[in-house]
Amino acid sequence: MTAPQSPNLPPELALDQRPGLPEDLRFLLGDYPRLIWGDHPNFGPTTRFYLDRHAMFREAMTVMTRLTDEALDGAKPVGRWSNEFGRIAGFFLQQLHGHHQIEDMHYFPALLKLQPRLQRGFDILDRDHHAIHDALDRFQAGAVGALNALQAGPSDPKRPMAEVLEELRRMDRLMDRHLFDEEEIVIPIMLDAGEDSLGL
Ligand SMILES: [Fe+2]
Ligand SMILES: [Fe+2]
């Protein structure tokens, strides 16, 4: 992960504060609104793959939330929750760390070169990654703690699961904002320049 390039971003643009991208970063999005992305002639396999990764992260969070809800409701045995949740959480954390690494090292520098006017947008996304990593660390620590506690047979097995669910919901809100705003910066540049210009 790169260090934040612009520590001077105002607090209202922080991931847990902003309602969306500021107006001055939406000039390219005006030409490439979300509704037309899939039908644009420059929408190729790299763009598809990129959006599919984001969809996979959203889906993993939805499934982890559903599994935990079911276990807390008593619809799913705790032992099954441990197995299924542990498997998906491990996959999610590994894939998301890898995705951020690729974005920080390859996608963001290449996209910024194509559209330097969006520098502040990439500063925002970079700061988001740091905030998400803090949330991921908290989530991972909570999940590992819950899985270990369940193995040891706690007196109230639902308590650690409820704490994991709370952390998961917090992370879900952050990820939702980040993925949405990131797509609105990244995809218009890809469509405008064409995937071949990325040099990835
Ligand atoms: Fe990202
Ligand atoms: Fe991403």
Image: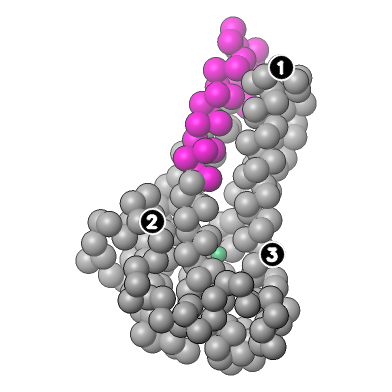
Residue name at image x 65 percent, y 67 percent: 51
Q: Secondary structure at mark 1?
A: loop
For disc 1, the marked residue is 74
Number of numbered tags placed on the structure image: 3
Q: What residue sits right under mark 2 in the picture?
A: 19
Q: What residue lies at 55% left-to-right and 17% top-to-bottom?
A: 159
**Measured along the vertical axis of the image, is residue 2 above or below residue 135?**
below
Mark 2 Cα-neighbour bin, 10 Å: few <14, some 14–19, many ≥20: few
Label at residue 158: none
Q: Nearer the viewer, mark 2 or mark 1?
A: 2
Is residue 146 shown to the viewer in this render?
yes
Instruction: In this rendered view, identify the residue nearer to me: 117 or 30.
Output: 30
Q: Position of residue 93 (x, y in %)?
A: 60, 49
Using the numbered discs, state the Cα–Cα distance from disc 3 to disc 2 in whole angstroms: 24 Å
The image shows residue 43 at horizontal and vertical percentages of: 68, 82
- What's the mark number on residue 52? 3
Q: Which residues are magenta?
A: 147-172
| Colour treatment of the image | one colour
